[in-house]
Every structure is written in structure tokens, then in C-alpha cells.
């Protein structure tokens, strides 16, 4: 075994990225109460800077993998996927921000990006002192490892990229839905009074509802594409496009939930709060599909659990 | 009688046309699908069955939980969903089709008032000049208008992407196409596996249900090899295969190389590299119970070997070093099964470096012989997944339709604009079936330009 620690520049860049995301999230929190709305520009600028550095770090890790003689896209294990997940969340958030310009959404979205990146960094460096079983679940290896035969395919790139962009869009939808539920319940309690204080900076619920729908309109086709590329790869690699493996099944469960969400919008009694709850459950199912299946269930994707 | 019968059919129809049913089915499918990710599916490990209470085992078996994705109730849910989406489509398609083929060319007063997007401007130039200008303007900025003279006013109607309203039905039909692919695959395809020892050939494979499936040709494994990274992780599994027809190698299918993620296809049957193992003989030294009369026994990997007393020795697994499995012991060892002449089977481990353990074991069970493990001959077999699925092209066709349909349904919108010219006034009304926000911007820009166009040169 190669016992030499890999001192990777990309890993260091990711530390700086994490710091930028932290300050970005902090600025978004200030935006909640600040009078001066310029802090919102600072917050998104920090997010842009973080995303740029994050992109460089991922690209560099790709190059480093070639330098080590392995040569594969940095999407091959839990550590790499969670770093990429964080990247996709910031990307989708900034795209939505360009379109809607409601910066405050960042308060509920940036934490998803920051926590995933922080998790990858914390539990790959620090030794875990809790119970052994829990340690096995949360620890991950940040080394660049050679690719096992089953993953040596270009489909890996198409499959992972489409799936994670979809997951990220669902994360944004979930953040927006939480905002919707907070604002909607407040407006219900205090009828005829305009929502004041912190809630005044929230977008109107009509806009939140629309953003939720728009995010899922981005995520749903991407998830569909992710499932299809996965099926195509499975068919090419072992002759069966669908075998009800836990990962496949959970991705289909997520697909069913968001399909229900999309139909709910045309059904009386299902718009508004119920749709927001469906979006939140959808993201919980997405998280289970991504993390729960790898960490708790066994199957074709179990290599991702290490 | 007829009315109640009609009522029944109608309520049946309404039931299957309802969107609430769609949501109910989608959520039911999502929730029930969880079962199969928690309860093991297909062939159950004996340990798992042993720890289930008889009641649970009975319950799970009755409900089909051990093969739930093929159980009657899950399939019923899928059929109901298909029926639901067919009914919904049949009910709504004629209406939508009318929308596409017979556009509303003129707006009445009530509809005009209900539209959120409207614009008004005035002009003083002669009406026919303005009409001509507006006509040219909208043709170059949007699309060619249909002009109607109506009640002393002129209405110009333009639209974009009317057929994008059909996108959602493309998605719905794609699901049916994928289902058809799945059904064709399960009726006319098969899925199995085969192990081929280096230098030998096979003409049939083992199906999932244990039945032999003839290939119609022969497949020979010339060579199998596995390579490793310097970290000890496998890098590549590689088989060299030759297809034989009537005993003769087929051109272009001689010494074909397959690795994981790069299969071999011949006559619609695809062979995928999936596993490998040792096919060589295992060697054991046999003595009688007091250590005399040494003989060497060669045990084949497939059939085992028969001992002098009529019992059969089979090898389950071997290792070059037992230490990771049994701390304190070391060296090569074999997990074997001894089936006595009376049919009674016993499983145990025999060692190469611990002769005393082998002796004690034999004495405890009062066997006639002592068995020592000697080693294994290096000869590999390649493990191949074999699949034939004539339905797969329907699945890809359905997938392509689904992506196209989603693109149309989500990203393209049916935009409609009416311009009314009436007594020195120009009104413009806009309507879109989705993506309201971006159309609002487009409408506002168009409004500004139209105002300029009407005003200018006036």
C-alpha cells in the first residue's frame, strides 16, 4: 500500500473555498437584519469567488490524478462526490440569483453548500473520536485513488454530473420551500398585517412558490437524464439497464416524488403549502438516495461509501 | 339499467382521468418502492431467513415482499399509472389539439379585461397606414399575423410554438414506450451467466431461473488475466474470447478482447466481463486415522472427488493465508464440505500448516480418514454475464422521447399576442401558458417598440 500522504494543492484550495463560503453565508445572515442591502452584493461576490476557486480546485485535482498516473475525473469516491455536490449547489444558486435577484435565498441555500464541503474536509483530516460505527459512516478518504474496473468509463462523468446538478437544483428548491413555509405561516397568523422584521426581506410567497417550481423544473429533467445515463451505462457494462438496485430504486423514488410535485401544481388543494412540503420531502429522499443508500444499504454503488 | 351502467362507466372514466389519482399513484409508488430497498430481494441469504420470525416470513412471502418489484400489487400500480396517463391524455388532447390547430383569432371584451399583459397607445395618422405599419412591425418582431376585421376594429393575431403544448403528452407517451420495451425484454430476452475455463468452450449458459439456455454457437475462452495497480487494487479483468460456428472460429470474433465496461456482442447476445476464479484442481493428502497409507487426492473445482469410503469431498473456498479469517493460524487452508455415504453433509476447514488440527478434527468426528490441504493448481475461469434484450431499443427511444418532451414541456412556451386597432387606439394583449416572467419582459420590450412604431413619422 502507498503509505505516503498526498499533499495536494487542490485540497488546500478547497480549504480557502470553504472559508469564502463561510463568509458568504455570514454576509447573507447579516442581510437578514441589515438596513444596507449592499451586503447582499458582498455575499454573492464571495459566493462567486468561492465558486471560482472551487472550480480551479476540482480542475487541479483532475490534473493531479493524471500526475499520479491514475487519470480520472474527480468523481470517483465519497469525498470527491461531496466536494462536487457543494460546487453544483453554489452554481445552481447563482444561476437562480441571476434570474430572480432575490439574494436573501442565499441564507437558506449556502448552508447546504458550506456543510457538504465542511463535512468532506473535517472528516477526511481530523481523526474521529466518537463511536467506531459512526466513524465508519462519516469518515472519508481524501486521497486520489486508482479507478476500479467497474468505474473505468466515460459514462461516469455524464452520469455523475447530470445527477448532481439535479440534486443541487432540488437543494435550492428545498431552501426556497422552507422560506415559503416560514413566510406563509407567519402571514396566516398575522392576517392583514404586512410581514415585518426579518420576513420583510423574504420574497413574496408567490415568488417563492414560483422559484420552487422553477428549481424543480431545472432539477427534474437533469435527474431524468442522470437516471437514463445510469441505465445506459449499466446496460453497457453488465447488460441490464435496470436491476432494482437500492440506488436505482431510490433515484426512482425521488423521481416519483417530484413527478407528484409537478402534477400537484395543477390540482386544487395541492398548491402552496403541500407543494412546499412535497419539495422538502423530495430533497430528503434525494439526500437519502445520495448518502443514505451509500452509507446504510448495500448494492452496486457501495464503492461510494468509502 | 342503461343509465346506471352508463353512470358506472362514466364514474370509472372520471376516476382514471383524475389528477388526484396521479398524485396518489406516484406517492404510493414512491412509498412502496422503499420496501424492496430494505428487505433483501430475490435469492435470500439463509442467515437472513433464519432470523425472521415464522409469522414475518409468511407475511412477507404472501405479500411478495421478497420480489416486490414483480409482485402483483406493484405491477398493478404500474398498470394503473399507465391507464391513468392514457385516460388523462385522451381526455385533454382534443382540447389541446384544438388550441393548436384552431387558434383564437379575435379577443372579446371579457377576455381582454382578464389578461394581465396589456398595452394601449393612440395615433392620429390614418388608420390604414397605422395598420400597415403595425402589420410589418409584428411580422418582423414576432411572427406573421392573421388579420381579422371585426365590428369596426382590426385584430392582428400572432403566436409562437403552439405545438409546445403537446410536450407533456410526449413525456406521457415516452413512459408507455419504455414500459413496452420492458415487457418485450421480459418476454423475448434473457439474462444469465456462464463460467468458461481457459482453453474450453461452452454452447449454453445458465439462466436466472436455473435453466440452461442454448446459445446457438460456441464461445471459447482463450485466456483470462487480471492486472493490479501498485496499491494492490485490481486494475483490469481481461478475457480473450473466440466465437465458434460448427466448431470453426468466426472471422472478426476470433481472439476478441473484453474487459469490464467493454463487452462482446454476437448475434444479439452480449457477453460482459463480470468475475473470475480458479478452475484448477485442489490437492489433498489423505491418510487413515492413525496416519498411515498416504494418498494424494485431486479434487476438481466443479464436481469434487469421491473418497475410498464413498463419501464425496467438495471445496467451497481456498485461501493462501488463513490468518485474516482465523487469527492465530496461518498458511494455506481450504473450506470443504464432506458428504457422507448416508447423504449427511459436514462443513469444516483443513489446513496445510496445522496437521495437528486436521488430525484432532478427524478424531473428534471419528472419520475414517485424515485430510490435509496441499495446494491448488493455477488455472483460471472467466465469469461472464450474458444478456439478450430486444426491448432495449424501445427503452432508449422512450428515454430520448422523454428528454425531448421534458425540454418542450418545461422550456418552450406557447406565446400569443393580439393587437387591436380601433378608432385612433392601438391595444396589445399578451398571453403565455408558462414561463410568465420572461414573457412579461418580452411583452414590455415589444410594447415600447410598438409605441415608437405607431408614434413615429406620425
Image (cartoon, coloured by chain):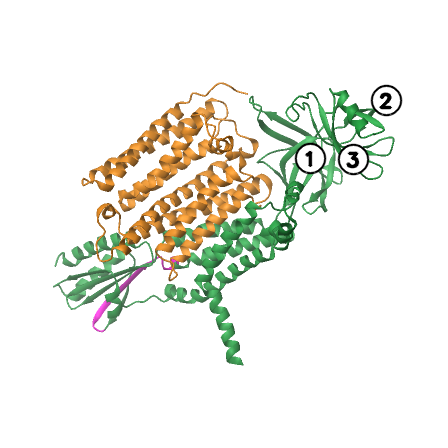
**A283 up-or-down from B274: above or below:** below
Name the secondary structure under disc 1: strand
Q: Residue furthest top?
A: A4
**Looking at the image, which is closer to me, B12 or A214?**
B12
Image x and y of residue A229, in percent = 50, 43
**A274 up-or-down from B299: above or below:** below
Residue range in magenta is B151-164
Residue for point 28% across, 68% down:
B106
Badge 2: how crowded within 10 Å, few (<14), some, or many (20+)?
few
Residue topped by disc 3? B303
Q: Is residue A152 left or right of residue B312?
A: left
Q: Earlier in the sequence, mark 3 or mark 2?
A: 2
Image x and y of residue B206, in percent = 70, 43
Residue topped by disc 1? B242
Query: Chain B's colour?
Result: green
**Looking at the image, which is closer to me, B56 or B35?**
B56
Measure the C-alpha gap from mark 1 to mark 2.
51 Å
Name the secondary structure under disc 3: loop
**Looking at the image, which is closer to me, B241 or B29?**
B29
Q: Are marks 3 and 1 in contact (CB under 8 Å)?
A: no
Q: Quadrant of the C terminus of chain B?
A: bottom left
Q: Is residue B181 magenta?
A: no
Please, which chain is the residue tagged with disc 1 on?
B
Please, which chain is the residue tagged with disc 2 on?
B
Amino acid at each position: 500500500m502507498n503509505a505516503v500522504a498526498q499533499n495536494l494543492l487542490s485540497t488546500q484550495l478547497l480549504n480557502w473555498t470553504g472559508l469564502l463560503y463561510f463568509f458568504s453565508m455570514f454576509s447573507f445572515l447579516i442581510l437578514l437584519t441589515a438596513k444596507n442591502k449592499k451586503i447582499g452584493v458582498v455575499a454573492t461576490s464571495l459566493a462567486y469567488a468561492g465558486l471560482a476557486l472551487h472550480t480551479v480546485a476540482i480542475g487541479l485535482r483532475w490534473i493531479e490524478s493524471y500526475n499520479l498516473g491514475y487519470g480520472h475525473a474527480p468523481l470517483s469516491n465519497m469525498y470527491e462526490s461531496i466536494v462536487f455536490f457543494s460546487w453544483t449547489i453554489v452554481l445552481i444558486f447563482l444561476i437562480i440569483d441571476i434570474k430572480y435577484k432575490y439574494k436573501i435565498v442565499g441564507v437558506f441555500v449556502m448552508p447546504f453548500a458550506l456543510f457538504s464541503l465542511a463535512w468532506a474536509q473535517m472528516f477526511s483530516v481530523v481523526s474521529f473520536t466518537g463511536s467506531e460505527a459512526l466513524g465508519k459512516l462519516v469518515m472519508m478518504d481524501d486521497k486520489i485513488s486508482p479507478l476500479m474496473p467497474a468505474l473505468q468509463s466515460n459514462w461516469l462523468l455524464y452520469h455523475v454530473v447530470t445527477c448532481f446538478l439535479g440534486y443541487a437544483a432540488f437543494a435550492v428548491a428545498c431552501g426556497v420551500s422552507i422560506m415559503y413555509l416560514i413566510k406563509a405561516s407567519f402571514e396566516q397568523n398575522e392576517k392583514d398585517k404586512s410581514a415585518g422584521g426579518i420576513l420583510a426581506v423574504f420574497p413574496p410567497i408567490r415568488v417563492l412558490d414560483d422559484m420552487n417550481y422553477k428549481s424543480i423544473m431545472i432539477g427534474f429533467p437533469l435527474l431524468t437524464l442522470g437516471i437514463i445515463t445510469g441505465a445506459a451505462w449499466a446496460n453497457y457494462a453488465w447488460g441490464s439497464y435496470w436491476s432494482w438496485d437500492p440506488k436505482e430504486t431510490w433515484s426512482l423514488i425521488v423521481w416519483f416524488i417530484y413527478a407528484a410535485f409537478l402534477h400537484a401544481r395543477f390540482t386544487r388543494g395541492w398548491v402552496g403549502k403541500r407543494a412546499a412540503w412535497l419539495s422538502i420531502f423530495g430533497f430528503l429522499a434525494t439526500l437519502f438516495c445520495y448518502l443514505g443508500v451509500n452509507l446504510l444499504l448495500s448494492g452496486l454503488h457501495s464503492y461510494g461509501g468509502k | 339499467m342503461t343509465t346506471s351502467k352508463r353512470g358506472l362507466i362514466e364514474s370509472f372514466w372520471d376516476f382514471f382521468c383524475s389528477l388526484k389519482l396521479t398524485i396518489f399513484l406516484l406517492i404510493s409508488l414512491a412509498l412502496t418502492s422503499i420496501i424492496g430497498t430494505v428487505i433483501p430481494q430475490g435469492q435470500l441469504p439463509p442467515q437472513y431467513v433464519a432470523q425472521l420470525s415464522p409469522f414475518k416470513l409468511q407475511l412477507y412471502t404472501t405479500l411478495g415482499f421478497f420480489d416486490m418489484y414483480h409482485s402483483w400489487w406493484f405491477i398493478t400500480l404500474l398498470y394503473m399509472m399507465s391507464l391513468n396517463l392514457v385516460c388523462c391524455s385522451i381526455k385533454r388532447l382534443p382540447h389541446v389539439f384544438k388550441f393548436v390547430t384552431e387558434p383564437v383569432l379575435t379577443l372579446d371584451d371579457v377576455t381582454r379585461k382578464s389578461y394581465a399583459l396589456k398595452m394601449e397607445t393612440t395615433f392620429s395618422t390614418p388608420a390604414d397606414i397605422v395598420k400597415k405599419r403595425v402589420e410589418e412591425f409584428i411580422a418582423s418582431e414576432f411572427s406573421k399575423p392573421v388579420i381579422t376585421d371585426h365590428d369596426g376594429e382590426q385584430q392582428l393575431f400572432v403566436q409562437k410554438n403552439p405545438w409546445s403544448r403537446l410536450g407533456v403528452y410526449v413525456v406521457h407517451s415516452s413512459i408507455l414506450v419504455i414500459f413496452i420495451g420492458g415487457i418485450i425484454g421480459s418476454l423475448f430476452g434473457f439474462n444469465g451467466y456462464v463460467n468458461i475455463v481457459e482453453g474450453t468452450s461452452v454452447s449454453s449458459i445458465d439462466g436466472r431461473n436455473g435453466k440452461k439456455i442454448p446459445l446457438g454457437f460456441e464461445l471459447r475462452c482463450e485466456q483470462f488475466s487480471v492486472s493490479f495497480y501498485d496499491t494492490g487494487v485490481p486494475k483490469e479483468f481481461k478475457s480473450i474470447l473466440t466465437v465458434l460456428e460448427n466448431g470453426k472460429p468466426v472471422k472478426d470474433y476470433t481472439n476478441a478482447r473484453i474487459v469490464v465496461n467493454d463487452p462482446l456482442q454476437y448475434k444479439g447476445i452480449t457477453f460482459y466481463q463480470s468475475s473470475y476464479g480458479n478452475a484448477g484442481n485442489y490437492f489433498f493428502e489423505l491418510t487413515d486415522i492413525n496416519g498411515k497409507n498416504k494418498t494424494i487426492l485431486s479434487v476438481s473445482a466443479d464436481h469434487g472427488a469421491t473418497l475410498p469410503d464413498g463419501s464425496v469431498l467438495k471445496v467451497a473456498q481456498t485461501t493462501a493465508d488463513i490468518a485474516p479469517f482465523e487469527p492465530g493460524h496461518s498458511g494455506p487452508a481450504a473450506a470443504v464440505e464432506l458428504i457422507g455415504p448416508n447423504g449427511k453433509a459436514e462443513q469444516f476447514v483443513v489446513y496445510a500448516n496445522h496437521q495437528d488440527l486436521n488430525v484432532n478434527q478427524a478424531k473428534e468426528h471419528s472419520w475414517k480418514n485424515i485430510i490435509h490441504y496441499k495446494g491448488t493448481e493455477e488455472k483460471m475461469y472467466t465469469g461472464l454475464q450474458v444478456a439478450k434484450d430486444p426491448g432495449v431499443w424501445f427503452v432508449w427511444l422512450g428515454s430520448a422521447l422523454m428528454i425531448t418532451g421534458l425540454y418542450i414541456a418545461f422550456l418552450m412556451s406557447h406565446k400569443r399576442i393580439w393587437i387591436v386597432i380601433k378608432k385612433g387606439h392601438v391595444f396589445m394583449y399578451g398571453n403565455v401558458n408558462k414561463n410568465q416572467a420572461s414573457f412579461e419582459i418580452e411583452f414590455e420590450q415589444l410594447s415600447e417598440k410598438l409605441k415608437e412604431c405607431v408614434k413615429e413619422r406620425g
